[in-house]
Image (cartoon, coloured by chain):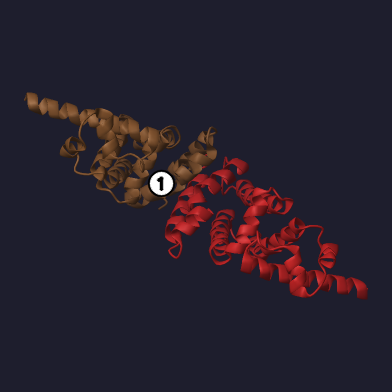
Chain colours: A brown, B red
Amino acid sequence: MDRSAGSNDTRTRILAAAEALLRRHGPAKTNVVDVARALGMSHANVYRHFASKAALMDTLVDRWLKRGVDELTAIAEGPGAADERLADWVLAQIAIKRARVLDDPEMFEAYHAAAEARSAVAQAYVDGQRGVLVGMIREGVETGVFPKLDPEAAADALVAAMTRFFHPYFLKLDGDAPKEAEARRVLAIMIAGMKAGAV
Amino acid sequence: MDRSAGSNDTRTRILAAAEALLRRHGPAKTNVVDVARALGMSHANVYRHFASKAALMDTLVDRWLKRGVDELTAIAEGPGAADERLADWVLAQIAIKRARVLDDPEMFEAYHAAAEARSAVAQAYVDGQRGVLVGMIREGVETGVFPKLDPEAAADALVAAMTRFFHPYFLKLDGDAPKEAEARRVLAIMIAGMKAGAV
């Protein structure tokens, strides 16, 4: 038990040091040797916990992505009608994405690299969030909030319609002047259209 | 009268030569001296028709933009209910933008440079098209197709919702696989929402 506790502790220390280095130097210039040096341990010791730099990065990205998930899950599974939770969830997604892209650019870059490399961690996150979205819409269909709607097609349409407000390209373009009122308006029209059953 | 006809002819020949050079070398590398050389005339003669390279480029961009406008105007002013014309007009806008970005990249680059430089020609085009969009929505409000709708706000929301399908960033990303079905779906939901009067 002591040994396992120590092992977990080392793993936690490696992740903390790696995340700090990544924030300082970006994902490309963060490597296992520097992480080991920062902790005063051999890189062989780091490799005992993470088989490769990619595995270490994936774990960092996974931890980072999961930090926002509890808030999103609470909204998705909370009380209220499906259309209201859906609106709150989309707005929370935009706020989280904005903070990730603008306030934490190095970690976002690491996530983006993982997504581009089709890492299982990034894919699981994207699939998981899409699943939550489809689930909320399906619940709305079953409770009569959204009649005659294909939940998968409607989810993809909603994501496409909101792209202007959550895609990194536009988040960077808007910078300190987020288009909140505009995002709420598009969302309101989309949800009204989904209630009308058009898709 | 002869002299005026000759002058118009020279102007037309300059524009044709400039457009051909622009398509071959891009806007940055197209200059008045090369246009004059291609026509076997002095650059002083070109400057008699266009005061500067910027003026020549603006005229080229203006001509180019206007080539697509007749089709769009015909849709906007055609028969049918405002919501149907609106849908056709948005889809035509996407098709024209796609052709401009993907099939005519040098001319698009010249337009983009003019827009970035806030040229009057580019601004007039953008304002004009937005005016047509607002006009169609206003007509829909007046005829009861879109009840309780602010035409300006609804126009901006519709443009934002369709950004995924007409912005150059995504047109280049999609390349030979345009997202037509997805665009039609978002458009159908937006128009249904606008009919429901939410904005």
Compared to residue A86, the image places residue A160 above or below, namely below
Q: Which residue is situated farthest in the left direction here?
A: A1
Q: Residue at x 60, y 63 (%)?
A: B106
* Crowding near the residue tagged with mark 1, few <14, some 14–19, many ≥20 C-alpha atoms within 10 Å: some
Q: Quadrant of residue B182?
A: bottom left
Residue A32: horizontal and vertical position, in percent? 26, 39
Residue B188: horizontal and vertical position, in percent? 47, 53
Residue B83: horizontal and vertical position, in percent? 55, 54
Apparent side of residue B64 relative to residue A114 in the rendered image (left or right): right
Residue A96: horizontal and vertical position, in percent? 39, 34
Q: Quadrant of residue A133?
A: top left
Is residue B73 in view from this perspective?
Answer: yes
Compared to residue A128, the image places residue A38 above or below, namely above
Quadrant of the snapshot with the N terminus of chain A? top left
Is residue A90 in view from this perspective?
Answer: no
Compared to residue B140, the image places residue A21 above or below, namely above
Q: Which residue is mark 1?
A: A159
What count of labels does the image hold? 1
Asked whether A55 or A72 is in front, the reply is: A55
Asked whether A25 or A167 is in front, the reply is: A25
Q: Residue at x 47, y 39 (%)?
A: A188
Query: Pointer 1 indicates a residue of which chain?
Result: A
Apparent side of residue B162 relative to residue A126 in the rendered image (left or right): right
Q: Secondary structure at mark 1?
A: helix
Asked whether A122 or A84 is in front, the reply is: A122
Q: Residue at x 45, y 43 (%)?
A: A168
Q: Looking at numbered disc 1 in the image, what kind of residue is underneath it?
A: Val
Q: Residue at x 57, y 40 (%)?
A: B148
Apparent side of residue A7 relative to residue A71 in the rendered image (left or right): left
